[in-house]
Image: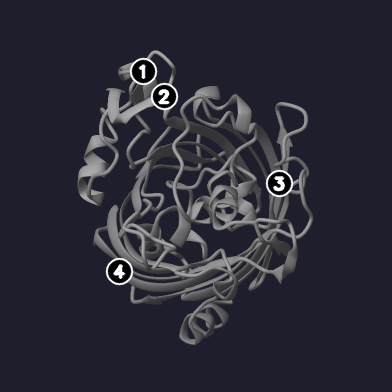
């Protein structure tokens, strides 16, 4: 089994029907787009403007500045592609620390295991079992600029080990560094008939970073999944016990769309000549800008590159929640379409979230995906003392 197999596997991890894709956008290290927490996973992969929690690093790091706890830790696991295999999964750990009311820092680690793969040579002879894996470590600083507005910057180191070096010459693990830029707006509203209400809006551009290569001799380098996520949410306290949030996330990959290459009368490529679209061999910044107008199908295809995730979250007495969401991706860009449901529990410092994915179409490799996340949130010791003195 050659190196190309592993790169192809990494590129289609999110594909529900590879053969139905007409002009999908693929990148290296796509595990960076897997929702690591069950809360976001239960809301159709929405969370850019949801209330802040430990896993805000993935959705919108700027939300950390609005956390109502002093510090917290989360641990999660996502079994992946259970419709195909049973040994691929994403494990994660995240934590944050507030400094006063305006600042916060956070760290997270994601480890993606592709299970065990039997490696063979060109003649089909088995050479041994390998365990391809990828991981990323993140750090962020978030700060409030006003009582309603915050921003954050994050840094990320990415490591991708898809092929065992001892079996193929000139092969190496791929590495990259990247950054995120995010903004969060959170404003309390006054609406008659409601105990309280809030409007929030989030914007996050993640994985702005260097291309990645798996060969020490090749000049070919692949884009990492630079992603734009934005969307609003509306939260209302119906009374002192019942809270409801409605939100929508929009996502777009900020990497070049594959062009349509020119062919001769026999259907053979003509020296890389492009018939429609733009040259994808550009710099990272140029690729981000070009991604808004380079689709060979024009504006109609550009619209198809956006995914939509509407979601709803209900809390009872800030102790128990139920959630639901829907994820839509155009058939020409991957055809991922699924519903998600889930629940959450909070008691004292402890939290537990669960989610389950329900595919719209049968034989979806994402079907039966379940996520679990454990959370621990803590207040400052002096805050607890003040609360006890009041009681």
Image coordinates of residue 36 in percent, x first then y, are: 58, 58
Q: Nearer the viewer, residue 267 or 253?
A: 267
Give the class, few, some or many, for how many residues have Cα within 10 Å of label 3's Cα (few <14, many ≥20).
many
Q: In the picture, which quadrant includes the N terminus? A: bottom right
Q: CA distance from mark 3 to mark 4?
A: 31 Å
Which secondary structure, mark 2? loop
Q: Is residue 62 visible?
A: yes
Q: CA distance from mark 2 to mark 3?
A: 50 Å
Give the class, few, some or many, for how many residues have Cα within 10 Å of label 4's Cα (few <14, many ≥20).
some
Which secondary structure, mark 4? loop
Give the class, few, some or many, for how many residues have Cα within 10 Å of label 2's Cα (few <14, many ≥20).
few
Q: CA distance from mark 2 to mark 1?
A: 5 Å
Which label's residue is closer to the chain start, 4 or 1?
A: 4
> In the image, which disc is placed on residue 102?
4
Q: In the image, what residue occupies the spot 65% across and 35% down?
A: 16
Image coordinates of residue 153 in percent, x first then y, are: 29, 63
Look at discs 2 and 3 and give the one toward the viewer: 2
Look at discs 4 and 2 and give the one toward the viewer: 2
Residue indicated by mark 2: 268
Check the image and report above or below for 322 versus 361. below
Q: Is residue 276 visible?
A: no
Check the image and report above or below for 351 versus 13. below
Which label's residue is closer to the chain start, 3 or 4?
A: 4
Q: CA distance from mark 4 to mark 2?
A: 60 Å
Q: In the image, what residue occupies the spot 38% across and 21% down?
A: 301
Residue indicated by mark 3: 342
Q: In the picture, which quadrant includes the C terminus? A: bottom right
Q: Nearer the viewer, residue 324 or 363?
A: 363
> In the image, which disc is placed on residue 264?
1
In the image: residue 86, left or right of residue 132: right
Look at discs 3 and 1 and give the one toward the viewer: 1
């Amino acid at each position: 089994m050659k190196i190309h197999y592993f790169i192809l596997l990494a590129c289609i991890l999110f594909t529900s029907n590879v053969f139905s894709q007409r002009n999908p956008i693929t990148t290296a290290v796509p595990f960076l787009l897997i929702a690591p927490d069950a809360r976001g996973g239960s809301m159709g992969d929405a969370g850019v403007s949801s209330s802040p929690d430990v896993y805000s690093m993935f959705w919108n790091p700027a939300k950390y500045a609005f956390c109502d706890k002093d510090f917290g830790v989360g641990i999660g696991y996502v079994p992946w592609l259970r419709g195909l295999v049973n040994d691929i999964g994403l494990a994660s750990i995240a934590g944050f620390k507030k400094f006063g009311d305006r600042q916060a820092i956070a760290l997270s680690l994601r480890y993606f295991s592709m299970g065990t793969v039997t490696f063979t040579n060109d003649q089909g002879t088995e050479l041994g079992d390998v365990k391809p894996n990828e991981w990323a470590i993140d750090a962020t600083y978030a700060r409030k600029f006003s009582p309603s507005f915050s921003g954050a910057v994050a840094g990320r180191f990415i490591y991708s080990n898809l092929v065992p070096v001892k079996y193929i010459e000139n092969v190496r693990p791929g590495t990259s560094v990247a950054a995120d830029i995010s903004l969060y707006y959170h404003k309390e509203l006054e609406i008659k008939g409601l105990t309280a209400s809030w409007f929030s809006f989030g914007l996050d551009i993640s994985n702005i970073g260097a291309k990645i290569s798996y060969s020490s001799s090749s000049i070919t380098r692949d884009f990492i999944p630079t992603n734009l996520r934005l969307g609003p949410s509306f939260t209302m306290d119906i009374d002192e016990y019942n809270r409801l949030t409605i939100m929508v996330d929009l996502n777009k990959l900020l990497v070049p769309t594959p062009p349509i290459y020119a062919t001769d009368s026999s259907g053979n490529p003509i020296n890389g000549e492009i018939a429609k679209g733009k040259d994808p061999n550009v710099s990272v910044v140029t690729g981000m800008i070009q991604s808004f107008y380079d689709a060979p199908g024009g504006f109609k295809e550009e619209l198809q590159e956006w995914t939509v995730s509407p979601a709803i979250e209900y809390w009872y007495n800030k102790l128990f929640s139920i959630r639901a969401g829907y994820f839509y991706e155009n058939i020409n860009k991957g055809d991922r379409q699924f519903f998600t449901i889930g629940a959450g529990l909070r008691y004292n410092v402890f939290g537990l979230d669960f989610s389950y994915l329900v595919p719209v179409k049968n034989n979806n490799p994402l079907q039966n995906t379940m996520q679990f996340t454990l959370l621990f949130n803590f207040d400052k010791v002096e805050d607890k003392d003040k609360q006890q003195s009041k009681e």
